[in-house]
Amino acid sequence: MCYTSKSHPPIPVISGAAVDTASVTLTSRDGTKFSAYTAMPAGNARVGMIVLPDVRGLHSFYMELADRFAERGIAAVAIDYFGRTAGLGPRTDDFSWQEHVAQTKVPQIAQDVAAAAARLRYDNPQRKLFTVGFCFGGSSSWFQGMENHGLSGVIGFYGQPTANARDGSPSPAARAAQLRAPLLALMAGDDPHIPVTEVEKFRAALTAAGKQHAIHIYANAPHSFFDRTAKEHAAASADAWEKVLAFIKQNS
């Protein structure tokens, strides 16, 4: 897992920003009900963000991240993965995520993302949508760019680029030719689970497929560096956040 209840997005809070938040229940195409958290800015936002958590599911870190997007005028929905196996509800530190993440499937996550996209488009069908994810959610975010969601871009922090998904589905690198949206990858240079050599294989696959992408590797930064409590990696976190905002602006 990437984050605990002591972790917080390393993004400045915009005091006084008008943000309307709510815990909601969404329904996938297969009828599954799952938990989500919405953060909506004042006015009719022209951009929306779907937040894909790590293996923990709908944890407080990702609700806070949705708030930070909304404070900047971006409508946001953070989703949970485990409606099919664990029922509804946000996930706390004592959630037994291992048994549930092992049962997740790439097509089911895509259905949940489609439901979140519909939620973001209900009041503005022309809203430009992006996904952002971390770790398990990082690769899940990249996978969404290979679906028919009509996304304007997909963003992943330290996702697995060359390993198959837990359900055996081919890796993001293996599916590079299927990518339909610009891709941003923000990777840790000191990540024992994702060597830089594997990141470079992902870059090569995207380049060979002629897909629009940007991959940034933060030297000496560990997995999960994007965390307010990791002060020694504050510069990497700040740069990554600026790259996320620039990517959104460039593609919307």
Image: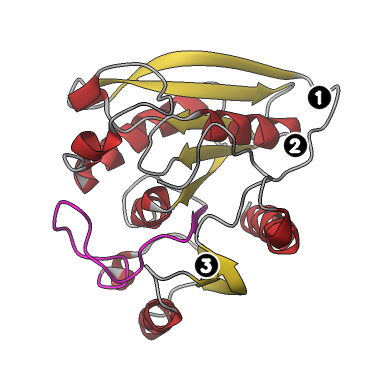
Identify which amino acid the numbered label 2 is placed on.
Arg
Q: Nearer the viewer, mark 1 or mark 3?
A: 3
Quarter of the figure with residue 16: top right
Callout 2: SS: loop
Image height check: is 104 above or below 178? above
Amino acid type for the residue under numbered disc 1: Ala
The region drawn magenta spans 153-174
Q: Looking at the image, can residue 146 be seen?
A: yes
Q: Are the residues at dot 1 and dot 2 in contact (C-beta closer than 8 Å)?
A: yes
Q: Residues within 10 Å of mark 3 (few under 14, many from 20)?
A: many
Q: Nearer the viewer, residue 131 or 166?
A: 166
**Are the residues tagged 1 and 3 within 8 Å (C-beta)?**
no
Instruction: Classify residue 32 as left or right of residue 235.
Output: left
Q: CA distance from mark 3 to mark 2?
A: 24 Å
Task: State the residue at coordinates (59%, 68%).
Answer: 221
Residue 33 magenta: no
Q: CA distance from mark 1 to mark 2?
A: 8 Å
Q: Which residue is mark 2?
A: 72
Question: In what element is the residue under mark 3?
Answer: strand
Q: Which mark is residue 187?
A: 3
Rendering coords of residue 127 (x, y %):
57, 37
Foreground label between 3 and 2:
3
Residue 135, placed above or below residue 25: below
Q: Earlier in the sequence, mark 1 or mark 3?
A: 1
- Residue 97: x and y, percent? 29, 35
In the displayed structure image, the side of residue 183 where residue 70 appears, left or right: right
Sequence-first disc among 1 and 2: 1
- Reading the image, the residue beneath label 1 is 17
The answer for how far apart the CA atoms under marks 1 and 3 are is: 30 Å
User: Is 176 located above or below residue 52 in the figure?
Assistant: below
The crowd level at tag 1 (other Cα within 10 Å; few <14, some 14-19, many 20+) is some
